[in-house]
Image (cartoon, helix red, strand yellow):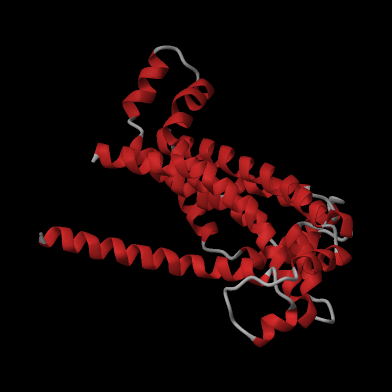
Amino acid sequence: MGFKIKKSILYIALIILGLTCLLPFMLMVVNATRSGAEISQSFTFIPGHNLQENWNRLFEYFNLFAGIRNSVIVAVPATLLGVYFPAMTAYGLAMYKFKGNNVIFGAILAFMMIPGQLSLIGFYQLCSTLHLVNSYIPLVIPAIAATGTVFFLRQYIIASVPTSLVEAARIDGANELYTFHRIIIPLVSPAMATMGIMGFIGNWNNYLLPMIILTKTDKFTLPVMMATLRAATDLASNQGATYLAVAISVIPILLVFCFFSRYIISSISAGAVKG
């Protein structure tokens, strides 16, 4: 009986915690239907009647669909590259014992601790020299060197992939690329999906680097376009439109999370069974 009471209390606490986490999203959706004056004057979860007005005001400043398209052009390739190549690097560091392995891994850890903002000036100068300013290439290609993803996947491979499995594939005549694509990737796909979700969120919400690299408005990603709305002179009347833009920008992130979350769940279940 006591166990059931504890379990019920735990479920109630989790439900309350879940609802608390949803409150900011609910408020964002509600404010997207209210005017700037209503948002400034009162706090409520009752939807307003200014959704159409906020939509029209939003498109007065920028084309929302163009911003979504530009963000997809940047976020999707950067996420794929930021998972595939780090996984290949992690596989090499985990399964190959060569001189300098620990040195390379230590360098990766060191680069993880350096804030990316410190290299912005040098990175912009490099892009300017290579004539890559106002191009999506500097926003996509650097994702190949995702040090945090390399670290996470290396630890995952060491913990979950037996060395004997790779050695058996080598004995059977499989080359390294075949082993990586047909054996390693299926085994580490939950971890890759996890890092892919976080990578997509980071690339989708990236604001600082696109703001510096991109100069033409027709190439602005969605966060940069939204910043132009927030920086408008009449901020009070634009609050509803800003909330609407933010609410729409969250939809692709939710879709990606819903699609890939099953891989995370399967990873947790597999770990529980293995334990």
Percent position of residue 195, x then y: 51, 47
> Front-most of 127 and 248?
248
In the image: residue 57, left or right of residue 263: right
Q: Residue at x 50, y 46 (%)?
A: 150
- Residue 100 seen from this side: no
Q: Residue at x 64, y 70 (%)?
A: 47
Query: Residue 26 is drawn in which quadrant?
Result: bottom right
Q: How many tags in the picture?
A: 0
Q: Is residue 9 above or below residue 236?
A: above
- Taking the view exactly as shown, the residue that stands out farthest to the left is 1
Q: Residue at x 44, y 25 (%)?
A: 183
Query: Residue 229 is drawn in which quadrant?
Result: bottom right
Q: Residue at x 72, y 63 (%)?
A: 245
- Residue 184 seen from this side: yes
In the image: residue 39, left or right of residue 160: right
In the image: residue 80, left or right of residue 186: right
Percent position of residue 226, x then y: 76, 66
- Quarter holding the N terminus? bottom left
- Quarter holding the C terminus? top left
> Front-most of 129 and 40?
40
In the image: residue 34, left or right of residue 157: right
Percent position of residue 127, x then y: 80, 55
